[in-house]
Amino acid sequence: MTDIIKILPDNVANQIAAGEVVQRPASAAKELLENAIDAGATDVQLIIKDAGKTLIQVVDNGAGMSDTDARLCFERHSTSKISEAHDLFALRTFGFRGEALASIAAVAQLEMKTKRADMELATLIQIEGSEVKQHTQCSAANGTSIAVKNLFFNVPARRKFLKADATETSYIIEEFNRVALVHPEVSFSYYNNTKLVTRLEKTTLRQRINGVFGSSYGEKLIPVEEKTNVVNISGFIGKPEFARKTRGEQYFFVNNRFIKHAFLHHAVTSAYAEMIPDKSFPSYFIYLAVDPKNIDVNIHPTKTEVKFSDEKAMYAIMKSAIRKSFGSFSITPTIDFEVERSMDFSNLDTSREIKIPTIKVNPDYNPFQTTNTARPSGSYTPPKDKNLPNWEKLYDIPEAQPEIDQKFNRVEKAEADMPDEITGISFFMFAKKYILTPVKSGLMFIDIANARERICYEQLLRNMENHQPMSQGLLFPQRVVLTPSEGELLGDVLNEIRALGFDVEPFGQNTFVVNGLPTDAENQDAKDLLEHLLESYKKNQLEAHLDKKLNLARSLAKNISMKFSRNLTTEEMQSIVGELFSCTMPETSPSGKKVLFVMTGDEIEKKMR
Ligand code: ADP
Ligand code: MG
C-alpha cells in the first residue's frame, strides 16, 4: 500500500482558510479597515466599485510597512501583533491571527503600496491567487493602500453566491460604520463608484454618531456611564420614545471592537421593559472596556462574538447602568432612584448566584408634593382635599417656579404653597376612552385604560412589597376547576397570587376555592380572571422573561384595566390624573403602551394655519 496523506500546497490551504475569513466583499473591507486602524492611521478612505465585486480599496496614513514586512504580511499566520500564546490574553488590536491578508490575497487580485515614514521609497506588490506577480519599489505617500480587485475571480462558486449589489453594499457600509463608530478621533471617507458618499471628520463620539446616522440623531440619545472594577461602560442609549418597530441601531463594542452578544442585549432590553412597546427595539451604542484577560475573543473566526469570564456580573452591571441613566436623565419623570453609586465587584464570588441590583422606588414619593403623605389606594376614590397630591401644579405654574417641561422630561419639586382647592381645571371625556385636560404646555390626552394599568400595576407592586395584599371578600366563595396544566401553574405561583390579593385555597384535583379577589377586580368572574391571568403570565414568561412577581402584577394590572369604556365623573377623572402622576412612570403602561401625550400650543396653532 502506498501512503495517501499529502500536505496541501499553500495556495490551496490559503483558499480554504479564506473561506472562513472572507465570505463577501464586506468581510474584506472590514479586515482592511481594521488593519488601517491597527496601524495607527488618523485618516482612512474606503473606496468600492460595484458593491465591492470589482474593487475594495482602503487607503490609510498609518505606519506603513518595510519592504520585507510588505512581502511577509501575505503569508499565513504572519502578524506583528502577537508573538507568544500568552499575548492572546492581552490583545488590544483588532487583528491578531495574521490570516486576513493571506486569505484575501488567495481569492483576489491584490495590489498594495506601502511606505514607512523613515523610508525613501514605497513598496509595490501585486499578488493574484496567492501568487506574487510583482514586487518593486515606487513612490507613494506615507501609509498603506491596498486594492482588492475582482474578489473571488478564481472561486466562481463563491462569486455566484454574492447577493444583489444593494445588499452587498449595505453590508460594506455596516462594516464601515462599525469601525467609524469606535474611532471618532479618525477621519473617514467612503467612495462608491468614484462618488464621495460619506465624509466623517474627526470629532466627539456623539457627533460621530450624528455623522453616521444623521444630524438630529443625537437628540434621541442619552449618555450612559458606569465604572466598576469588572467593566467600564460608556456610550449612548436611545430615549424610549424613539424605540422602533424594526431592529434599529444596536451596537456593543468591547475594547473598541464591534461584538454581538445576545445575553448583554437582553440585559439592555430588559432595562427598557415597561418603557417601550412590546416588539419594539431601543437603539444603543454601548462601549465596554474590559481587561483583555477577562475576555475570550478567540471563539469565532470573524470575531464578532466574545465570551466574558463573568457574564452574570456583566449582565447585572449593564442593566443597572441603563436604569441609572434613565434616572439621571429623568426619562421617567418622577422616579426616585437609589441605585448604589459605586458598585464594587472586586470580591465577587463567581460561584454564587448574582442578584441583579434592583431599583428601589419610594412608593410614597410624590414629586408634586412638598410634604409626603401616603397615597390612598384604589384607583377610584376621589382624594380628600387635604390629602390631595399637588398634581394641579401641572396646570398653573408661576413663571419663576421650577416646572415640568413640555415633554415631561423633567419634573422638579415645586416649593410654593399649594392652593387648598383646585380651581379652573377642566377634564373632558372623549370616546369613553380618553381624558382630555388642558395643561400649561398644551392639551393633554390620557388613555384611561393604559393609565389605569399603570396605576394598578404600581399599586400592586407596593402591596406586594409591603406584604399588604388588597383583597375584597366574596359574598359567596367560588369553586374554580382548572385544566391540569393551569392547575399546576397556579400551584407554582400560589404565594405570589395571594400577595396580589387573591384569597385562594387549593381544593385538590386542579380545583381551587376563591374567597376573595384583588381590589378593583372584585366584580370579575373568579374563574375567568384566573384563567386570563395565567394565560398572560405564561405569555409574558415566554416573551419577556420577567420575574414571577413583576410578571403576575403586570398580568393582573392588564386584566383589571382592559377594554375600559364608560363615562367618568369629574371626580373620577381628577382621581385618575392624580394617581397617575404619583406613579413612577406615568408616560407608559407596564406593557409598554403610551399613556399620554401633550399637544402643544404651537402644534395646535400650526393646525389652525
Ligand atoms: P493581523 O491583522 O491579524 O495581524 P493581517 O493579515 O490582517 O493579520 O495583517 C498582517 C500584518 O500586516 C499585520 O500584523 C500588520 O503588521 C501588517 N499590516 C496589515 N495591514 C497594514 C496596514 N494597513 N498598515 C500597516 N501594516 C499593516
Ligand atoms: Mg488584520
Image (cartoon, rainbow, N blue to C red):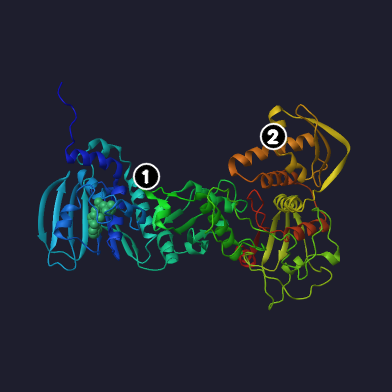
Kindly tell me whether residue 525 is visible in this rendering: no
Kind of element beneath mark 2:
helix
Residue at the spot of label 1:
300
The image shows residue 31 at horizontal and vertical percentages of 29, 52
**Nearer to us in this view, 504 or 379:** 504
| Disc 1: CA contacts within 10 A as few (<14), some (14-19) or many (>=20) | few
In the picture, the quarter occupied by the C terminus is bottom right
Kindly tell me whether residue 65 is visible in this rendering: yes
The answer to whether mark 1 is within 8 Å of ligand 1 is: no
Query: In 3D space, how far apart are the residues under numbered discs 1 and 2 (Cα atoms)?
Result: 40 Å
Query: On the rendering, which quadrant does ligand 1 occupy?
Result: bottom left
The answer to whether mark 2 is within 8 Å of ligand 1 is: no
Residue at the spot of label 2:
489
In the picture, measured across the screen, residue 48 lies left or right of residue 280, that is left
Residue type, label 1: His
The image shows residue 47 at horizontal and vertical percentages of 26, 56
In the picture, measured across the screen, residue 145 lies left or right of residue 347, that is left
Residue 239, numbered circle: none
Residue in view at x 56 percent, y 46 percent: 279
**Nearer to us in this view, 152 or 351:** 351
In the picture, measured across the screen, residue 108 lies left or right of residue 88, that is left
Kind of element beneath mark 1:
loop
Residue in view at x 20 percent, y 66 percent: 142
